[in-house]
Image (spheres, rainbow, N blue to C red):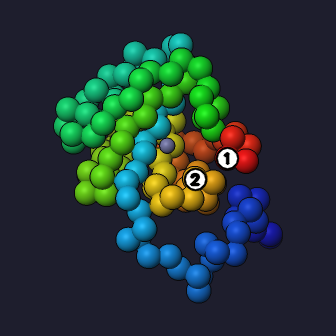
Amino acid sequence: MGAHPQLAKCPPTTQIGRMQNTDIITEYHGHIYFDEATKAQAEQLCLKARDMFGVSMGRMHDRPVGPHPMGSCQLGATPEQFAKLLPWLALNHAGLIVFCHPSTGDHLADHRDHAIWIGAGLELNLAVFG
Ligand code: ZN
């Protein structure tokens, strides 16, 4: 049996022997995805996360924006906040798809190679990164 197709996409820099130090991570984003039917649920989840962890909450984007293939709302977290936020989202996303990524200064790698998906993985529009 061959490798999972997703693994075949991994560039060599993320393979063993080329480990990166997490000191390069300045913050994390959590993008909560929604459609018309789940917008209110997504907004409640974001508000709760903001109030519980002190993370920043962006606008509710009803349409795809940037690399995101659906409506989304962005949570911004420090590494310390994210250590609490990620397991909380894992337990409480309630079926919503959540895309998390670190910010290292390399936007393409952060979205393509360093993605953390909760619920399901979606194809991003990586062309926005040139
Ligand atoms: Zn982001």
Cα separation, mark 2 vs mark 1, equals 7 Å
Residue 4 lies, with reference to residue 42, above or below; the image says below
Residue 47 lies, with reference to residue 8, above or below; the image says above
The residue sitting at the right extreme is 2
Left or right: 46 in relation to 104: left
- Neighbor class of circle 2 (other Cα within 10 Å; few <14, some 14-19, many 20+) is some
Q: Secondary structure at mark 2?
A: helix
Q: Is residue 117 visible?
A: yes
Most foreground residue, 77 or 5: 77
Most foreground residue, 10 or 92: 10
Q: Amino acid at mark 1?
A: Phe
Residue occupying the point 71% across, 58% down:
6
Q: How many marks?
A: 2
Residue occupying the point 46% across, 17% down:
39
Q: Position of residue 127 (x, y in %)?
A: 74, 43
Q: Are marks 2 and 1 in contact (CB under 8 Å)?
A: yes
Q: Is residue 42 visible?
A: no
The residue sitting at the bottom extreme is 17
Q: Amino acid at mark 2?
A: His
Q: Quadrant of residue 17?
A: bottom right
What residue does disc 1 label?
129
What residue does disc 2 label?
107
Q: Position of residue 16 (x, y in %)?
A: 59, 82
Q: Quadrant of residue 35?
A: top right
